[in-house]
Image (cartoon, rainbow, N blue to C red):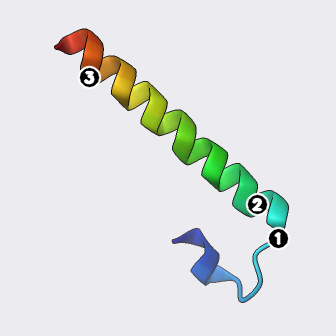
Amino acid sequence: MTASSSPVAPPRSLALELLLLAALATLWGASFTFIK
C-alpha cells in the first residue's frame, strides 16, 4: 500500500486513494459487464 511510505498518511490522501480504488472498481465492473 502507498500508506506504508509514510508513517502518518493525511486523511485527504487516504480519501483520494479510496476514491481512486472505487473508480477503478466501477470501471472494471462496467467493462466486465459490457464484455459479458
Q: Nearer the viewer, residue 19 or 1?
A: 19
Amino acid type at circle 1 is Pro
Q: Residue at x 48, y 37 (%)?
A: 24
- The secondary element bearing badge 2 is classed as helix
**Left or right of 18: which side holds 36?**
left
Looking at the image, is 18 positioned above or below residue 13?
A: above
Q: Which mark is residue 13?
A: 2
Graded by Cα atoms within 10 Å as few (under 14), some (14 to 19) or many (20 or more), the crowding at tag 2 reads few
Quadrant assignment for the C terminus: top left
Residue at point 62%, 52% (across, down): 18
Q: Residues within 10 Å of mark 3 (few under 14, many from 20)?
A: few
Q: Quadrant of residue 32 in the image? A: top left
Circles 2 and 3, Cβ within 8 Å, touching? The answer is: no
Q: Position of residue 1 (x, y in %)?
A: 51, 71
Tag 3 secondary structure: helix
Q: Tell me whether circle 2 and circle 1 mark residues in contact (CB < 8 Å).
A: yes
Marks 3/1: CA–CA distance: 33 Å
- Disc 1 is placed on an element classified as loop
Alpha-carbon distance for marks 2 and 3? 28 Å
Q: Is residue 31 left or right of residue 20?
A: left
Residue 10's tag is 1
Residue 6 location, x and y as percent?
A: 70, 83
The residue indicated by pointer 3 is 32
Mark 3 / mark 1, whichever is N-terminal: 1
